[in-house]
Image (tube, rainbow, N blue to C red):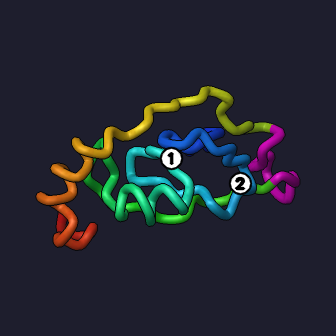
């Protein structure tokens, strides 16, 4: 089950469970769309993968207790700002490779 982390790992912007700005990689590293596009250039600094929009977990119990009330979002903040110089070096190796080929 997705953690639905509460903030961008780089800029610490709030990303509530219903945020349309949250992006995740396959390891659930969570960043805001601005950081993914402007800082990370769609390369996860932790694993090298690409990003996709994070799904929205329903707030209403529509069926079978599959909703935020039963499975709440995480409250654990993982603020780990990316080192720009280190990420530029990482990007040099991976930026030209499409995410599905990394």
Q: Nearest the camera: 69 or 95?
A: 95
Q: Residues within 10 Å of mark 1 (few under 14, many from 20)?
A: many
Q: How many marks?
A: 2
Image height of 63 relative to 84, above or below: below
Q: Residue furthest top?
A: 76
Q: Residue furthest left?
A: 93
In this image, 4 relative to 30: left or right? Answer: right
Q: Which mark is residue 57?
A: 2
Magenta extent:
59-69
The residue located at (17%, 61%) in the rendering is 94
In this image, 48 relative to 11: left or right? Answer: left
Residue 72, horizontal then vertical, whole percent: 74, 37
Q: Residue furthest front?
A: 85
Verify whether residue 62 appears in magenta. Answer: yes
Image height of 86 relative to 22, above or below: above
| Residue under pointer 1 | 30
Secondary element at tag 2: loop
Residue 12, horizontal then vertical, whole percent: 59, 39
Can you say which quadrant of the picture contains the N terminus?
Answer: top right
Q: Earlier in the sequence, mark 2 or mark 1?
A: 1
């Amino acid at each position: 089950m997705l953690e639905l982390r509460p903030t961008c790992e780089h800029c610490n912007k709030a990303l509530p469970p219903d945020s349309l700005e949250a992006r995740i990689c396959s390891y659930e590293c969570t960043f805001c769309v601005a950081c993914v596009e402007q800082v990370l250039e769609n390369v996860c600094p932790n694993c090298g993968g690409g990003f996709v929009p994070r799904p929205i977990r329903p707030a209403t119990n529509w069926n079978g207790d599959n909703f935020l009330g039963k499975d709440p979002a995480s409250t654990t903040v993982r603020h780990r700002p990316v080192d720009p110089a280190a990420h530029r070096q990482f990007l040099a190796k991976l930026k030209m490779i499409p995410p599905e080929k990394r």
